[in-house]
Image (cartoon, helix red, strand yellow):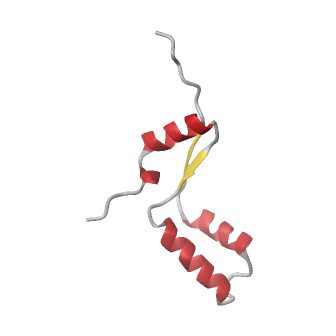
Amino acid sequence: MSQPGGSQNALLCQLTANACRRPVVAGPTEGTALGNILVQAIAMGYLPDLATARQVAAASVTQQRYEPQAANLSP
């Protein structure tokens, strides 16, 4: 049985954003397959370039964005 990837773990994504002080954008578990299909679509001429493929990907999936949060270390 397949386990979900790290992008599906909200705590991991939030902690990563906090530690890196950068936003984290998590997509679907099928992201690798989607990327493969889009690269093939470019190679076959169905999509003109990578920028268009990125637009198609963004419009095709739901993404979750995690903004960095400062740690509250006070008791």
Reply above or below: 45 against 51.
below
- At 49% from the left and 73% from the top, the residue drawn is 33
Which residue is situated farthest in the top direction here?
75
Which residue is situated farthest in the bottom direction here?
44
Q: Is residue 50 visible?
A: yes
Instruction: Tell me residue 43's x, y (percent).
Output: 66, 86
- At 53% from the left and 72% from the top, the residue drawn is 34
Q: Which quadrant of the figure has residue 22?
A: top right
- At 68% from the left and 67% from the top, the residue drawn is 55
Left or right? Give the position of 51 relative to 69: right
For the residue pair 17 and 41, the one nearer the viewer reads as: 17
Q: Which quadrant of the figure has residue 38?
A: bottom right
Reply above or below: 7 against 56.
above
Instruction: Tell me residue 44's x, y (percent).
Output: 65, 90
Quadrant (top left, top right, bottom left, bottom right) of the N terminus: bottom left
Q: Which quadrant of the figure has residue 42?
A: bottom right
Reply above or below: 12 against 71.
below
Left or right? Give the position of 7 relative to 3: right
Instruction: Tell me residue 15's x, y (percent).
Output: 50, 37
Instruction: Tell me residue 21's x, y (percent).
Output: 63, 36
